Image (cartoon, rainbow, N blue to C red):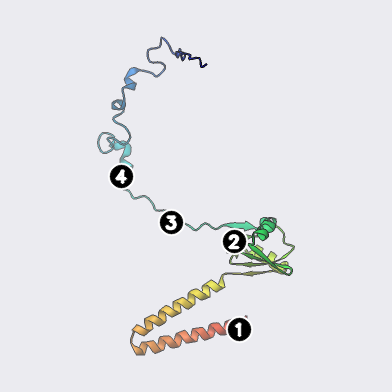
Amino acid sequence: MVVRRRKKRVTKMLGQRTRGNGDTKKRRGAGSRGGRGLAGSHKHKYSKYAGKFGKEKKKVLSRKIIREINIDLLIQKMPKLEAAGKISKEENTIIVDGSKIGFDKLLSKGELTQKIIVRNMKASKKAIEKIKKAGGDVELEEIAEEEFEEKAEEKTEEVVEKEEPVKEKKIVEKIEEKKEVKKEEKKKK
């Protein structure tokens, strides 16, 4: 059986007229402070809020968050990543794909003892040096740049088709020359 008990009466500040809250004139509701919140900000409280009106707020441009990982942490996580199929092994080399593991940049903290090939990932200068010392390689996002240039060339060709035939020949010749130069550069590499 539950026993009902009366709540004890609060006996603090008994005999004090305002119970420790100062003069009663200060506790007469929102009227004593000229209204709640921003009330009166264009009237009787203008001087208090004068700087808030008529100014545009600075727009903060959203920046891409670069997810970074150090070499030592990558080596530490390798067994788990390999078990999940995010890293592949070919003979003695480990192939790390940044898009699969969810990181954008590789930093140089830590020591490398294994051959690593890094793809789709940026790397700091020191990290690239360490990877190359260990016999690995860093394949930067050159492929994406080449694809972007090819798409740009296709768009220019589309524009050329719409223009006059005299201009078309000159532009097409320039595009073909650029393609030949790129092919020669690739052969040199």
**Label 3 residue SS:** loop
**Label 4 residue SS:** loop
Q: Can residue 95 be seen in this view?
A: yes
Comparing labels 4 and 3, the label whose residue is closer to the camera: 3
Find residue 39 and report its image quarter.
top left
124 over 18 or under it: above or below = below
Comparing labels 2 and 4, the label whose residue is closer to the camera: 2
For residue 61, the mark is 3
Q: Does 131 sit left or right of 50 as displayed?
A: right
Do labels 3 and 1 touch, CB within 8 Å?
A: no
48 over 124 or under it: above or below = above
Percent of width and height locating residue 41? 28, 37
Q: Which amino acid does label 4 sit on?
A: Phe
For residue 53, the mark is 4
Mark closer to the chain start, 4 or 3: 4
Mark closer to the chain start, 1 or 4: 4
Comparing labels 2 and 3, the label whose residue is closer to the camera: 2
Crowd band around label 4 with a 10 angstrom C-alpha radius: few (<14), some (14–19), many (20+): few
